[in-house]
Image (cartoon, helix red, strand yellow):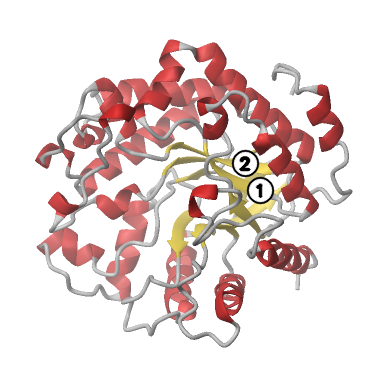
Amino acid sequence: MMRLVKLTVHALVLLCLVCPWHAGAGQLTVTNGQFSLDGKSPFRAVGVNYFDAVNRTLNNPADRSAILGLRMLARYEVPFVRVMFGGFWPNELRVYLTDPARYFAVLDEFVGAAEQAQVGIVASLAWNYAAIPDLVGEPASAWGQPDSKTHQLFRRYVSEVVGRYHKSPAIWMWEFGNEMALYADLPNSDQWRPKIDVSKGTPAFRGPPDDLKGKDVMVALAEFSKTVRVVDATTPISSGNALPRPYAFNNARFAKWTADSEEQFCEMLGRDNPAGFDSVSIHIYPHYKGYFGARDRDYNAILAPVARCAKRANKPVFAGEFGVAENESHGDPEGVRGAFNKLLDSLVANDVGLAAAWVFDFSFQNSSYNITAVNQRAYQLEELRRVNRILRAGK
């Protein structure tokens, strides 16, 4: 991608040492309800979340560790990363407005490094759904108003980002954000309003206008997909939503904490991944329970209905997050490792198309989820390599 800023000589030399296996380069599409890579279908793979890979350099221009991280992931045959493609807090996103050259230099370098390493990118553009409303002085519910300042700025941002990078072979999917639907229609919404940190650009107070309804999520997703498709007609689009809550339908219709039936669950899964979105986005962890009477860690009891719902929608499943924290082994005889492998194997067994482990090289979660090549969770990279080899072999 010639218009990207040049990497340093040091970084280029390192990236040229990547192991010879490369599967991250190429165009990802959705064909007949399955992911395809360069026209080869079905394509299935497991990757990682590289949550702050871009944001760390936005906050500290001297921090180029994410470039080397991509090289490390390629050595483990990890074919793609899911990334917060920008800032988390309003002040971090403000750099896009005040110093766009610096902002895009960071993104340019990361996309260029991903191309060199042949690692695909799922680019999540509104990870913190409150950040853009905060930046323009509106409440979070402004997402439900297409003519709001929130949408005006986001359309501008999406158009510029997608227009700049959509021809890169590193871009696998465009994603709206992270788990926005989980905050919609909550009977106790006053307890789940967006975070406050005035030093990082948020308002000092949140109120009822910051409470989300399902319609706000639906409008936000519809506007996002329309904006992407004006510029990019083919790259898959993901909502970034997690599994609907076990009682999402009854929360929305009756403000009750009553467990949903599978049919109600399917309806909410469709709401959270509507027309214009090419995959069914879910996130799954050991603490997700209460679905259809499923026992703790009975992943098949959750993933099998997801697979049925996705098949009806003729869409592949994208498990944008999965993982096991240090305190979530729940008596598994093999500890966290056994619990992680059980979840990973369930994702494969239930025909999930793409899945991304949480989370690579994120030091803030050293005690829970952080995966590196040198810490106690390095085995997870080995397991991802093992599963990717099985999936490539079509077994």
Q: Quadrant of the C terminus?
A: bottom right
Q: Report if residue 26 is visible in the image.
A: no
Q: Nearer the viewer, residue 5 or 352?
A: 5
The correct choice, above or below, for 70 with respect to 41 in the image is above
SS under mark 1: strand
Residue found at x 44% / y 72%: 286
Horizontal and vertical percent position of residue 313 = 44, 60
Q: Are the residues at dot 1 and dot 2 in contact (C-beta closer than 8 Å)?
A: yes
Query: Visible in this render: residue 53?
Result: yes
Disc 1 versus disc 2: distance between alpha carbons? Answer: 6 Å
Q: Residues within 10 Å of mark 2 (few under 14, many from 20)?
A: many
Q: Nearer the viewer, residue 176 or 32?
A: 176
**Which quarter of the image is occupied by the N terminus?**
top right
Residue drawn at x 50%, y 27% is: 59
Q: Nearer the viewer, residue 131 or 91?
A: 91
Residue 82 is left or right of residue 77, and the answer is: left
269 w.r.t. 105: above or below: below
Question: In terms of image quadrants, where is residue 348?
Answer: bottom right
Mark earlier in primary sequence (1, 2): 1
Position of 185 with respect to 97 (left or right) is left
For residue 67, the mark is: none
Q: Is residue 57 left or right of residue 182?
A: right
Residue linked to disc 1: 80
The residue type indicated by label 1 comes to Phe
Where residue 206 appears, x then y in whole percent?
15, 38
Q: State which quadrant residue 204 falls in.
A: top left
What amino acid type is highlighted by mark number 2?
Answer: Ile
Number of disc labels: 2
Element under disc 2: strand
The residue to which callout 2 is attached is 121
Would you call the spot at circle 1 few (<14 residues within 10 Å), some (14-19), or many (20 or more)?
many
